[in-house]
Amino acid sequence: MVIRVKLFAMLRQQAGWRERSLHVSEGSTAADAWRLLTDEFPVLLGATASVRFALNGAYGGPADRLHEGDELAVIPPVAGGAQGLRWLAISPDPLDARLLADLRAKVPTSADGALVLFVGQTRDSPGTHAPGQEEAARDVHGQAVEALDYEAFDEMALTILDAIASEIEQRFGVTRLAIIHRTGRVAMGEASVVICAAAPHRAAAFEAARYAIEELKARAPIWKSELFADGSVWLGAPARTGPPAEEAAT
């Protein structure tokens, strides 16, 4: 299918065009279209952490689905904006060393004296099975985990990650934050989630990273299945619907 893509300001200048058609596959997202653009125009790749997407004239997210004839505008940083950064993503792509280096380079500024980078990775010992998975857990008892499989409600997950980032800004004053989670099969030892927080002082950066991973695991609609040689088991507990203080007040 064909969509229209618009670039502005520095992106337009770097690519050498303002508007053009782009052929994308059925089911593609804004992030998929951006990957096609950066593959063709590598000069744009450095803007990945800071761009925002607008779909048919309204701000959206990287997981927004595209349809025939849609207009996708890629929005670079705007004049007068805050000196913050939110890099939020649900991605099927590996969270590899290149991504970690990119986070290390782009999340902190010269005003930040601390950068906390948390990487959650696959381990071979089983976790706590979800309610209703008792029989499946018995079937694989004593076996080692061979891989994980993640499924996400992408759009809702990104909305919740954005809410968590706002809570982190309010609670700890941290405005430069990345939360990136894998979907699909994740092999043993590979990263499934990365949190990166930058702040002038280490205490705030540590608190922000800890809050991000704890709240993501408690609230984001992301599901994990452990894969064994003889079966699989879903993990988890009922989702918490808001931040800790809200739930305690009810």
Image: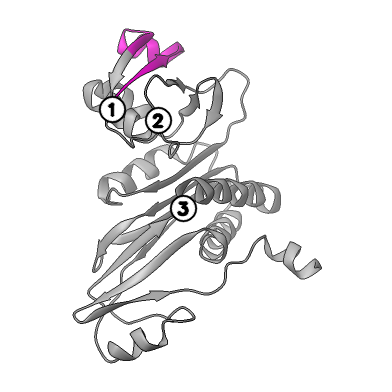
Residue located beneath label 3 in the image: 153
Counting from the top left corner in percent of width and height, residue 139 is at 29, 89
The stretch in magenta equals 1-20
**Would residue 206 appear left or right of 105 to someone viewing this image?**
right
**Secondary structure state at the residue bearing disc 1:** loop
Q: In the image, is residue 147 above or below residue 35?
A: below
Residue 70 visible in the shown view: yes
Q: Are marks 3 and 2 in contact (CB under 8 Å)?
A: no
Q: Position of residue 206 (x, y in %)?
A: 54, 59
Q: CA distance from mark 3 to mark 2?
A: 16 Å
Can you tell which mark lies on residue 24? 1
**Kind of residue indicated by mark 3:** Phe
Q: Is residue 20 above or below residue 115?
A: above
- Amino acid type of disc 1? Val
Residue underneath mark 2: 66
Q: Residue furthest left?
A: 229
Q: Nearer the viewer, residue 80 or 229?
A: 229
Question: What's the residue at 31%, 28% (across, down)?
Answer: 45
Residue positioned 22% across, 22% down in the render: 40
Vertical placement of 70 versus 126: above or below?
Answer: above
| Foreground residue among 16 and 62 | 62
For residue 241, side relative to residue 103 (left or right) = right
In depth, the one of 170 and 122 nearer the eye is 122
Proximity of marks 2 and 1: CB atoms separated by less than 8 Å: yes
**How many neighbours does mark 3 have within 10 angstroms: few (below 14), some (14-19), or many (20 or more)?**
few
In-image side of 167 versus 35 (left or right): right
Q: Is residue 114 visible?
A: no
Viewer-nearest residue: 158 or 107: 158
Name which quarter of the figure residue 118 lies in.
Answer: bottom left
Q: Earlier in the sequence, mark 2 or mark 1?
A: 1
